[in-house]
Amino acid sequence: MQQLYTDREQRFVGLAAELADEFAPRAAAHDAEGSFPFENYARLKESGYQRLIIPEALGGLGATMLERIKAQERLAQGCGATALAINMHFNVLGLLIDVYRKFKDPNVERKLREIASDRLICGGSGSEPDNAIIAIKPRTVARAAEGGWSVNGRKIFGTQSIALDYFFCEATWEDAPAGPTILTLFIAPRDTPGLQFKDDWDVMGMRATASRSSELKDAFVPQSGVILTRPVSNSGRVTKIFAKAPFTIGAPYIGIAIAARNFVVDFMRERRRFPYKDPMSHLPSVYNKVGEMEMLIEGARAAMWKAADEMDRDHPRSWSRKAVAARMIAIENSVRVVDLALRAVGGSSYFKRFPLERLFRDVRAGLYHPFDSDETLEFLGKTAFDLPLFETFG
């Protein structure tokens, strides 16, 4: 599958391709062991990929959202787990960058410059147990303490937890003077007594992401660790704030789908099966499936790339809804592509010596990121009618 890129896009995609080809040979071992790819992360830092989206003026490479999406697609073709993990780093950076651009906060600027120059890794968790809409009101709570805050709560799905230099989370300050207020926190985990990560990431797919849960027990966060405050609210404004991060998750899954498609074409091109004279690539049951895979991948790309372009242009009142829809299209299409890949290859796809069974497990993780498919449909439908997002009817 050939795709033309602008010269600027090729700079980022070419870097991702170089890394992906290096990461691919060890992806299966990290999956089997459930081990974190520290050597991949060393290369992400060394190559500068870790600072991909930080503005050039602050020491980064300055990739736009569209350029990031295209690069992440390519990186995931080598190792989906690494691409998904570093995507969470970019999501936290994206929040910092948005805050910096809007408020010109010198504290946030210093953090961005430090992350770029020292090649630091950011991550954390916005998810909590039994809390469906974390952005509305985190159950994690913060109490004012001398010089900062004392924070208590639990978080889940803290991707790349064992590689973090900075940890992102949110907490609710219940007794704030202006009413319940959400604090966006940004702290160094190894310097924060009371923050612990649990060794509980034993899962079906994306096994190398180290997406462990964490617990904060009277964890002290200095005032400088607060990068944003906002009132507790159930308005649609929440969606605007957090739409970018869920949207970008579609890109690694498209990359996994492309890897599955490429394996099928390479594996079946000359594969023979008695008593047929021609290779199995000549069978309609094979090439029709590849044709459908091509259609699904290009549909996912079209939706994601268009939404990313609109996001870069910040089209008012348009990109957030389109981003939510595009992400769902990307993930649902990618899952279908990998399913078709297994059907096209047949029984051989069931063996761990081939990558399809790992891609089959990894791509399914996309179904569980918020918004999931049902939540996406609910959001798009309710917003079309201007209905409240977080109320049920019937």
Image: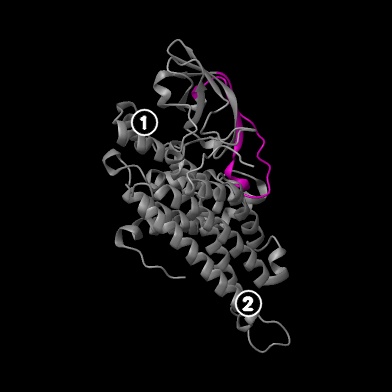
Q: Secondary structure at mark 2?
A: helix
Residue in front for this viewpoint, 61 or 181? 181
The residue at the far bottom in this view is 277
**Residue at the image position 30 percent from the left and 31 percent from the top:** 103
Residue in front for this viewpoint, 10 or 190? 10
Chosen colour scheme: one colour
The residue at the far front in this view is 394
> Is residue 208 magenta-colored?
yes
Residue 6: image location, x then y, percent: 31, 62
Name the residue carrying label 1: 111
Q: Quadrant of the C terminus?
A: top right
Residue 189: image location, x then y, percent: 51, 27
Q: Which span is picked out in magenta?
A: 191-218
Question: Which amino acid type is shown beneath numbered disc 1?
Answer: Lys
**Residue at the image position 61 percent from the left and 58 percent from the top:** 359
Q: Disc 2 or disc 1, which is closer to the eye?
A: 2
Is 225 situated above or below 345? above
Question: Which amino acid type is shown beneath numbered disc 2?
Answer: Val
Name the residue carrying label 2: 286
